[in-house]
Amino acid sequence: MTEALVADFGAALDGLDVTWSRTASEGFEAAVDEAIVSPAVGAMLPFELVSLEGTDVVVQPTPTQLTEAVTGVTAAGLGIAEYGTVMIQSRPSGDEPVSLYPKRHVAVLRRSDLVAGVPEAIEWLGGEFAAGRDNVIFATGASATADMGELVTGVHGPGEVHVILIEDL
Amino acid sequence: MSSRRHTAEKIRHLLETEGDAVRANATHFNDRRYDAIERFDRFEGLRDEARSIKEEAIEQLPDLIDQVTEAVEANGGHVHIAADAEQANRYIEEVCRDEDADVLVKSKSMTTEEVEVNDHLESIGVDVYETDLGEFVIQLADEAPSHLIGPAIHKSKDDIARLFNEVFDPDEPFETSEQLTRFARDYLGERIREADVGMTGANFVLADSGTIVIVTNEGNARKSAVTPDTHIAVTGVEKLLPSVTELGPFIELIARTGTGQSIAQYVTLLSPPTDSPTIEFERPDHPIEGGQDDREFHLVLIDNGRLDMRDDADLRETLYCIRCGACANSCANFQNVGGHAFGGETYTGGIATGWEAGIYGLDSAAEFNDLCTGCSRCVNACPVKIDIPWINTVVRDRINQDDDQAFDFLVEGLTPDDDPGGVDLQKRVFGNVDTLATLSSATAPLSNWFAGSGPVKWAMERFLGIDRRRDLPQFRRQTLRSWYADRGSRVTDPDRRAVLYPDVYSNHVLVERGQSAVRVLEGLGVEVVIPDVGESGRAPLSQGMLETARRNAEHTASVLENYVEDGYDIVVIEPSDLAMFRRDYDRLLPGERESIANDSYEVMEYVYGLFENEGDPEVLVPGQGRPLAYHSHCQLRTLGLEVYTEAVFDRLGYDVQTSDVECCGMAGSFGYKSQYYDLSMAVGETLADQFDDPSRQIVASGTSCQEQLDSLLDREARHPVEIVDPWTT
């Protein structure tokens, strides 16, 4: 079942031109360093067993670091297999600006947080909202516009997205 | 009359200046919508769900307003319910004054266009920057949005480059979309950083958590909402949903019906003030931190006529609108002329009639309401199943009643309708086409010579606005009914019995197709009767003459119902009349007339059904690969019935090419009207372009499609039933 979800998720990401990689929690730091383009900033990951410490990512960046970073690394609270969507939750650690300002966004997703579709995501959100975690972005692919005549990616938000899937969490 | 000329000139000008860009963009959205929905098998189920959620939410609206007020205040934000634009602007002004704001950045919001907040803020010295690139373009051009979600779709890339080069005078002139986008992003990125206040709209508001939901592709709303410390969200009260639980269907629908994406790039749920850190660009080397305590949030909920719309049985549905623009994209007239003609003060496309009538009043809706021809192509496109043609009809009726134009007694005999004297003469003539047809048949061919003569055509254009470039219908002395009365039935041992509905055109003008229908049905073992039954109500309905439509419908329904009770099927040639029986009678004659809807069939649909029930295809003309070019009919397609004609042709071995335009552009009386002739022809051209193979016989199901195709192409169009009728070959 979950392998099928991963396959769907991967296919959706491919369709969005979002790159992705799979890693065990053990090789997580290396996977991060491979996924980022420096300089990189990040928001602390709310996960056990993995962290951005030991990577080249600067957490709690200054405004200067934020605007000069090429890559922003954040957690994704949930992934939606059907659409290749990652859910970014706003936190005091700065997930929102970190996933928004740099040109490249790297989202870290635990395999167990992958769900099939929007109905499952809404059900999960019901619980999150009840717990007061009620700021969240469904982010699907890179920011884009066709307002200037043709489709251009990378507008106000990131132009590149990469997802790291942690297999054993 | 001068207003007709003025309308014609305005439309001609827009066709020339904006038509190409609008057509390219709107049809692109529309094609993508079809693709996205074809790939998505849950579409219909989600539409039903979305519809009932919206119905329920509007029902509960006063409670939801109380709930959201409580929730936002509990989160630490402020709520202001603005009765009108002035109250909204005054509140927003106060917030800006308290913040000492010099610069305000905005993400796209039609509701802020509605209240004209930009003008107000500029007048008190606040610089306002639109950060959605489409909105930025029209802000620079000082124009109004031409589309609900693509405000600048009337501009081509070259238009935008010219504008940017003029305004910003860059060292290297901009040429590509890429260059323009990069420049605008960087320029607006700086404005966002220096802004004191960020203003957004909201696509949805979740009452129980005080959450605003914003759907975007660019990411500008995210930046505008969270970068400045102060966030003002401005939105209509109708955007309220009870909770996050109800949001799901809309996330999966709104981008599909809007742009044909399966989901938007960003669906942002914010319950401000958020605990996301504020970014102090003036302290560039301090780690970002803080959050909730430094943030301020104001939710401005706008009434501005919406609560009255809620109490208005016919306009209420408008409040279900999620403003995706699908009704505009699926509209042939909109595709060609865009929202600067097909729109009012703020809103554009088919649903705009409801919004403009509810918010600004009938005068604003009257400016463009006639551009809805009732073709119904938007009906299946709307994600919340709003009956947009009905709203247009009702508003047209109200405009008619509102109009105090002097009544011309000379035409009273020709227009024996039940609608009040205020109805415009042009509408009265088209709305009473049955009377005109009866009189013209009785006096044919004299009536045709008369109507075709130069002076009369001139007078008809001058006084009725019937464009003299159009050929008028040639009325027949012998009607279908009188032909059949003379001939009688030729079926002795019938398998079935059917009423062939003698629509005005089959009876008086296109008599051959009626005769073909009789012979084809009889050949397949059906006994046919053609009763003395009047006009279905379609003609007056299309002119917004509801009382007359209701009268005609009552009469027709009561005659047909008797036949249904006696076991007859109702077979209909003219698709717009079938759509009356299947769709509109439900509105016009509530609750009573289900039997007609269930027992009426389009003639080729009926032939298909006879094939399925052991009718013998051999009695009809075999195709043997004969090449046909088939344009079904807008309303037939909305009912999903064009497939039967195709299936019958296929079964008989014809080689059929089908059109994929939304409408032929004639749309009943629309193309005859002098003020809309050019638009009608522009719409028709796209159809004609698809039928460029001269070896194909042109086939069309509707009278007006046939007339339009006849005038656009040198080949004569026929009804499908004539093609398969052995008598005609």
Image (tube, grey):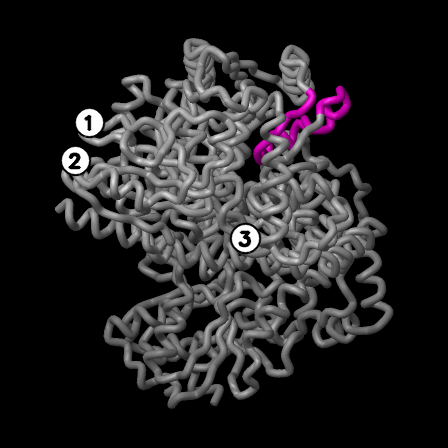
Can you give x and y, in whole percent of width and height, for residue B297 in the image? 52, 16
Q: Which residue is mark 2?
A: A169
- Residue at x 43%, y 19% (from the top left corner): B274
Q: Is residue B401 visible?
A: no
**Same-chain status of marks 2 and 3:** no
Helix, strand or loop under label 3: helix
Q: Nearer the viewer, residue B579 or B449?
A: B579
Q: Is residue B123 inside the magenta stretch?
A: yes
What is the crowding at mark 2: few (fewer than 14 residues within 10 Å), some, or many (at least 20)?
some
State how far apart marks 3 and 1 are (Cα). Answer: 49 Å
Relative height, residue B698 to residue B232 (above, below): below
Magenta segment range? B102-126
| Marks 2 & 3, CB-CB < 8 Å contact | no
Residue type at numbered disc 1: Glu
Toward which corner of the image does residue B25 lie, by quadrant?
A: bottom right
Q: Which residue is mark 3?
A: B329
Relative height, residue B114 to residue B666 (above, below): above
- Residue at x 76%, y 64% (from the top left corner): B467
Residue type at numbered disc 3: Asn
| Marks 2 & 1, CB-CB < 8 Å contact | yes
Toward which corner of the image does residue A134 lie, by quadrant?
A: top left
Q: Nearer the viewer, residue B24 or B448?
A: B24
Relative height, residue B90 to residue B136 (above, below): above
Helix, strand or loop under label 1: loop
Q: Is residue B619 visible?
A: yes
Helix, strand or loop under label 2: loop
Please give left or right for residue B716 compared with residue B556 in the image. Answer: right
Please give left or right for residue B100 compared with residue B260 in the image. Answer: right
**Same-chain status of marks 3 and 1:** no
Q: Which residue is mark 1?
A: A48
